[in-house]
Image (cartoon, coloured by chain):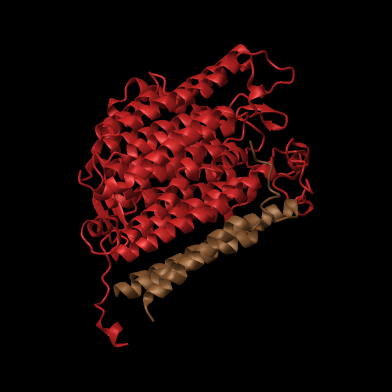
Amino acid sequence: MNALAQVAPLTAPPIDYAAIAPLLVVLGGACVSVLFEAFLPRHQRWPAQVALSVLVVAVAGIALGVYAGSAPVAGIVTLASALTVDGPTLFLWGTLLVLGFGSLLLIADRSVEPGGAFIASAVERASVAAAPGTTTGPTGVDPEHVDRSYGAPGEAPTMQTEVFPFVLFALGGMMAFVAANDLLTMFVALEVLSLPLYLVCGLARRRRLLSQEAAVKYFLLGAFASAFFLYGLALLYGYAGSVKLVAIATAAVGTPKSDALLFGGLALLVVGLLFKGSVGPFHTWTPDVYQGAPTPITAFMAACTKVAAFGALLRVLHVAFGSTHWEWRGVMWVVAIASMAIGAVLGLTQTDLKRMIAYSSVAHAGFLLLGVMAITREGVSSTLFYLLAYGFTTLGVFGVISLVRTADGEATHLSQWAGLAKRSPILAGVMTFLLLGLAGIPLTSGFTAKFAVFSAALGDGMAPLVVIALVFSAVAAFFYLRVIVLMYFSETPEDGPTVTVPGAFTTVAVTLGVVVTLLLGVAPTLVLGWAGAGGLTG
Amino acid sequence: MSPTNYLLLSGLLFTVGAIGVLVRRNAIVVFMCIELMLNAVNLSLVTFARMNGQLDGQVMAFFVMVVAAAEVVVGLAIIMSIFRTRRSSSVDDANLLKY
């Protein structure tokens, strides 16, 4: 009682609303979206949710643009120093918002398949049991749900619109994740971004068993990884007496406490973050989840989750552990090499296109680590640029993958893509360009991004690692080229897939991916300038 | 009693949970092991708060509890939906996604 009486009265911390407006708009929009889901009749939900989501992302983008125009270069720390809004935060927020916009368009599209990827119709359920690869389940059709009506008979089936609030919450969590200035905020943001993602992975109805299996695997492994993150947080709290990133950096320089707590905590923390970024040996969930999740969600995860995870990793390693980087860099070298090797070598053996892109993302995570490990301004700006470039290319690739279909759904097996160029030269051309972007051919964003990251790593004394990375880039280029050769120089199979003519939404998303991939390859100066506009603020 | 013992207990509980995740096959049991890991973290947070003479660690334990509760909601929903279609909650039965 006496102890309580001595505590000074609490004063509300000052909040810079202008700085955090984009985050507030996205999270507030997600709450409104939940209300739409609860109170609107079913047939009105799709137009309302799509309009709301686009509006929310646009308003958040405008708020970000307005603030960025007058933002202090040094960055600010607000909300009782829970969030940092500095140059990298603003860049990552912009990246997340634009990539989120593209993913929302892919998710909202209903023209590619009737009802969209998140169809909820009972009529369509019967075909689920007949789809290849899903017949092993004891029950194909769930009798409990057959009578649930999502649209009048004879009308086009509607989609499950729950996906929109989930995606908005995940986007809000990602934005908080990259701006978090202490580990507790980072942990809460990690869960806010992860929990909706686990759910949307399992929302597909056409290949339901695959989708649910992906959700279970992602959830169990993701929760396991966040437990590691949390134990790392606890150990660092024990070491530094605070979970603020700056306090950890200060404590690391001069305390008599044992370094076991510091580096044990760092290791566990980084395992949690590397898992989210699907790096190296912590990637095991990636191929399964990328393959099983509905393709628009895979696009969202591949583009945005990667940005969020590496944004947070950048902040942790640079702000809290920048002063001790000689101690941990050796281990991270091993992780980066393992990630590049696993991604490049296992990617070669894949026969499913979505799995192949998943291994490609593991390889790219290895390249990204090179930039993250360079504790310099160039390290930060090149990583930011790489994330932007990679995100748009991947978004375009998954947009294209969603267009090639058979009667059963998407045709993701490589053999089904044989000779596709004869049937649809435009689609094959777009896919070729995007794959060359992933491979890092000059005049695409992939080349500029790799060049920026590798020169940052060279500048911080990691020449041997850059050589290894170059070798693995060449190995990884092989499996992209394999798809291109297959599309142009193979015979078309008899019962090959058809190429759907995309509706406006998917067209815009894919065009966005292609245009950004080209522009960042041809004229990267402007965006490189934005990426290097400000350093990380502690 | 020295607070270090609580840290050792917490490390032990965390390890038991981690091993449980790796060796148990029922999705619900795996999930319970993850909860055990989170609670082990709570114990060490509270112990560190005592050792540092602060309240921060205890407040953090509350955050962890809330997040763990939200995780239970999502996790059980996912496990239940796969149980409905497969009539099994074993993580070994879910094996369509490979190579």
Residue in the image at 42% along x and 43% along y: A57
Question: Is residue A316 visible to us here?
Answer: yes
Q: Nearer the viewer, residue A532 or A482?
A: A482
Residue in the image at 36% along x and 22% along y: A521
| Image-based side of A330 in relation to B42, left or right | left
Q: Nearer the viewer, residue A113 or A408?
A: A408
| Image-based side of A254 in relation to A302, left or right | left
Residue at far bottom of view? A2
Q: How far across and down, in percent of the image, does residue A417 sit?
A: 63, 22
Quarter occupied by residue A376: top left
Chain B colour as displayed: brown
Q: Say if A73 sits above or below B51 in the image.
A: above
| Image-based side of B97 in relation to A321, left or right | right
Which quadrant of the rendered structure holds the N terminus of chain A? Answer: bottom left
Q: How far across and down, in percent of the image, does residue A121 sit?
A: 71, 44
Q: Nearer the viewer, residue A325 or B57?
A: A325
Query: In the figure, the red chain has which letter?
Result: A
